[in-house]
Amino acid sequence: MTSVPMPIPSRTQYVLDAIKHRILTGRLTPGQALVETELAAQFGVSKTPVREALKTLAGTGLVVMSQYKGVTVRMVDADMAREVYDVRLLLEPEAVKRAVHRGASLDAARDALTRAAAATDTAERSLANRDFHRALYLPCGNPLLGRMLDEVRDQAALVSAVAWAASPSWEREAGEHHEILRLALAGDADGAARALHSHIASFVDRAFPQAADQEGQQ
């Protein structure tokens, strides 16, 4: 690929977005090694923006940095799914309930559903679905709560991508999204929160039944 002159921050963002897209589409699979020199050659940049992009991805939980194994795409298993979705179950329904109580605008959530329906690949659909959830919880009135949920967004998207690759279920989830939004638009904060809790729990139960079994044993 021919190198395109651009500021270092732009190069880093370009590499970051490209690697993230490859992970969420399954082109880079869980456990796969990410070699700086190879990625730099593919994207036509130096190793510096690649290194910075990988650091950012490690911070969001999409890749793992190891002294011995180098950088790899994070593995997705029942334990990882349970950890990520447990946080969401604890925090996200409450955040959405507060957002509805505050009468927050839900236009961004509606737009995200439109983009998800028009998506042409898993990454686009995953990112649009992620934006839908964020548009519901972000206006909760508690910036710290919003940031805590933001921290697990990429990991939740990775779980979804892996689960969809094994058993596509986005049509069912799209219907659940529309029901959550309908309740929220109607001002039914408790109903929207319950529907969201059921949506999150049922997804991980279907995709990673081992996680549900482990939860029941604790």
Image: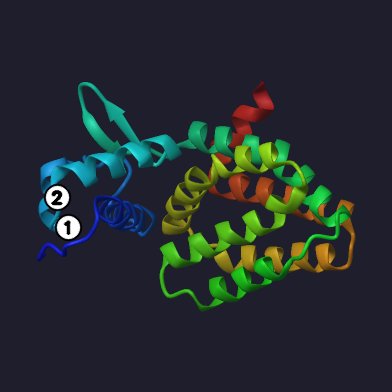
Q: Which residue is mark 1?
A: 43
Q: Determine the CA span between mark 1 and mark 2.
A: 5 Å
User: Is 95 rendered above or below residue 185?
Assistant: above
Within 10 angstroms of label 1, few (less than 14), some, or many (20 or more) residues? some
Q: Which residue is mark 2?
A: 40
User: Is 108 rendered above or below residue 28?
Assistant: below
Where is residue 195? Give x, y as percent.
Answer: 78, 55
* Residue 145 appears in the picture as rendered: yes
Where is residue 151? Give x, y as percent.
Answer: 54, 39
* Residue name at image x 54 percent, y 64 percent: 128
- Circle 2 SS class: helix
Residue farthest to the front, as pictured: 7
* Residue name at image x 41 percent, y 70 percent: 121
User: Is 16 rendered above or below residue 124?
Assistant: above
* Quarter location, residue 85: top right
1 and 2 marks in contact (CB < 8 Å): yes
Q: Nearer the viewer, residue 164 or 19?
A: 19
- Circle 1 SS class: helix
| Identity, as a three-letter code, of the amino acid under mark 2 | Ala
| Identity, as a three-letter code, of the amino acid under mark 1 | Phe
